[in-house]
Amino acid sequence: MEAILLVGGQGTRLRPLTISTPKPMLPVAGFPCTSHQIALAASAGIDRIVLGTSYRAEVFEEYFSGQDLGVEIRYAVESEPLGTGGAIRNAAEQLTCGPDDPVVIFNGDVLTGLDISDLVSKWREARADVALYLTRVEDPRAYGLVPTDAAGRVLEFKEKPTTPEEIVTDQINAGCYVFKRSVIDRIPAGQVVSVERETFPELLSTGATVIGVVDDGYWLDLGTPLAFAQGSADLVRGIAPSPLLAGRTGDAVIHDSAVVHDTAIVSGGTYVGAHVVIGENAIVDASVIYDGVTIGSGARVVRSIVSTNASIGSQSSITDTVIAENASLGAHNELNFGARVFPGAEISDSAIRFSSDR
Ligand code: GDD
Ligand code: MG
């Protein structure tokens, strides 16, 4: 079985982490989201995956080349982003399956333990053109709303509703589909198409069989820094399933080469990368600490992302904060609530006491 992974978005909401690394390649619990997805796909019997890339396409090829992932990887690079539908159409040029075969499609920033084989079976049983994986969320406004009838037929597709009247369901598009190959081939080639705003509504208006399959298992869109830290912590604690972490989950995953002082507390699903140094009495909770980071004594890091080779000075405290690569935060600083420090920035000792609710 073949799959397409959509990994060409800009990851704007995760800036500045996505300046150098595309969102699907940012490590969550030590592996890029794309690796977790490839492993999930492989475990469902998918043996060939086309990555639809655009933004920073080279990063994917550099990372995956020469790795034995148990699946064949192909790249479909868009010189200008073609949108989700255009990207699917472009990637389909490299599929080898027949017109009636199923093709599994994934958004590249979705963390899930979805039973892909079950979604394919439901698609087959319903003789559907498209089967969509749906999940339920409390606040659906940031997603694509997908109401279904009692038999599971999709009634409407409403991407990112703006008025209260448009919020007709708590079922949302969870970012994984099974398409009949011939349906993909009907998407216009070489132009920008949104699968959510154009292809799905068009399929419904032409009477195609589009079914929704609600699955209440683990699901998270890694679109924002808070969600990103949460997803990593969930993987580390085994709340989010991934074949890559099987047997290694716990309160923290710490790379063998990291040096953590005996008195430091590292918990809440924190991931600590290679060559990290964590000082005396530091507290690191529910955070993502990339390779080469230094965290000083008495520092406090909560629900934050500290990127490669950055440093946090002693007695500094950061909560819900992103520190980009090579940035250095001096001692006795305090950053909260969505603060973002850009790559290479240097903040001196006792310079910032930042609190904002934005
Ligand atoms: N190749 C390529 N080209 N990929 C793209 C492009 C493009 O032009 N635009 C977006 N993508 C990829 C992104 O990298 C991401 O993996 C995926 O398509 C979805 O884009 P996002 O930017 O993350 O969309 P979203 O999170 O706002 O909404 C989408 O996902 C939700 C679930 O997570 C929609 O599909 C919603 O309907 C859905 O509910
Ligand atoms: Mg997304």
Image (cartoon, rainbow, N blue to C red):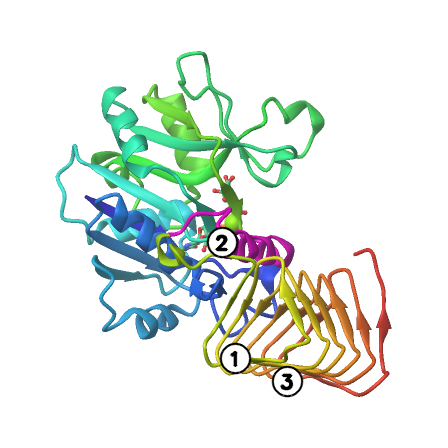
| Labels 3 and 1 touching (C-beta < 8 A) | no
Q: Nearer the viewer, residue 174 or 32?
A: 32
Q: State how many labels appear.
A: 3
Q: Amino acid at mark 1?
A: Ala
- From the top left corner, tell me how far across and down residue 283 is, in percent: 71, 69
Q: Is residue 49 left or right of residue 337?
A: left
In the rendered image, residue 187, in percent from the top left (x then y), is placed at 31, 40
| Residue occupying image coordinates x 36% and y 48% | 86
Q: Nearer the viewer, mark 2 or mark 1?
A: 1
Circle 3: residue type: Gly
Residue nearer the viewer, 14 or 243? 243
Q: Which residues are magenta?
A: 222-242
Q: Please determine whether, in this image, residue 298 is positioned above or below residue 77.
A: below
Q: Is residue 202 magenta?
A: no
Q: Which residue is mark 2?
A: 235
Residue position marked by numbered label 1 in the rendering: 258
